[in-house]
Image (tube, rainbow, N blue to C red):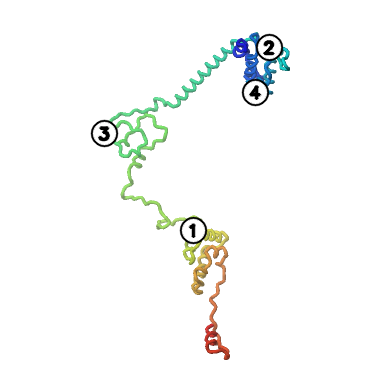
Amino acid sequence: MSTEAVDWAMDKAPMPRTEKGKPDTTGRHVLQVLAEYANPAGANTHPSVLRIQFRTGYDRTTVQRALRRLEKAGLIRRDGSVDSRTRWQLAMEMVRPASDWTDLEREETEYRAAAAERKRRSRSKGVTGAESVTVTDAKPVTVTDAESVTGDVTDSAPSRHALNAQPSRTQRRPNHQQPPVNQLHKDSCPPPASEPDPGPQSLFDEPNAPIQLTAKQQQDADFDAWYALYPRKENRGKARLAFAAAVKKGVKPDYLITALHKHRDHWVACKTETKFIPHPTTWLNGERYDDELTTPANRWKGPAPTAPSSMTDEEKKRALRF
């Protein structure tokens, strides 16, 4: 290893450039490896491409391209071969211009100045001007409701109310819109006792004007009335969907309620048990509201049946029971 060659490759050799004019850091790294194997005159350096790959970590193609760029820039020259490896001669007569260092110093100075300017602007944005700061006197001020006061509080005598304090013409208002003094009085004072707040109206109140229900509210009310009449309470949610489907098909809610009254009377007349009454959903989906109901079949009204004479008395009694 030659100290002179390494010192030249690291500090004194011109910076190689890529095809786009940018610093070729890959080529400079390869040049430093070649300098490590050169003599003090920069000659007789012949590391293999594999050795350069091991020292730099680049792949084979990258190393070969870097060698071609260095050769094209004139920083290295071919000087024969050793054991089928190319022997290179470093162009140590080439020296880096002093302007490279001055240019770096100038760029560093400009960067520091720009950073300082950005910092100054950032600080100036967080500080408001002195005109927006309002300094008030520390004389006693009477405040009744702190939550209802949104404006600035200025100097006032002990006998004056804080809400009556008028802002001066030179005093700046805050960014938000300050409500007028009358509005502040109205917000801070409770409503008079003679005019109580009526409060919100519900569906169960009796207001002066009738409450207009939406179509959904009216349908829910009709379903509740129908479901309250149905004798078998099961699957209310499914029944609500079936009720809405029937109404959507064009069946009037009043017709469903009237039909249910008839079915209730029929079930009572037939003494139908609850478990034999169809589910509400089944009644609606099956369109049972359109069924034709018949009265219970009358019992046998003809002559009383007689048992054959060949039967015994016990068998006659058993047969006549049915």
Amino acid at circle 3: Pro
Q: Amino acid at mark 1?
A: Asp
10 Å crowding of disc 2: few (<14), some (14-19), many (20+): many
User: Which numbered marker is on residue 220?
Assistant: 1
Residue 256 location, x and y as percent? 52, 65
Sequence-wise, the earlier of marks 2 and 4 is 2
Q: Earlier in the sequence, mark 4 or mark 3?
A: 4
Camera-side mark, 2 or 1? 2
CA gap, disc 4 to disc 3? 84 Å
The residues tagged by marks 2 and 4 sit, at their Cα atoms, a distance apart of 23 Å
Which label number is shown at residue 158? Answer: 3
Q: Quadrant of residue 27?
A: top right
201 relative position to 43: left or right: left
Discs 3/2, front:
2
Mark 3 or mark 1: name the one nearer the start of the chain: 3
Amino acid carrying mark 2 in the image: Asn
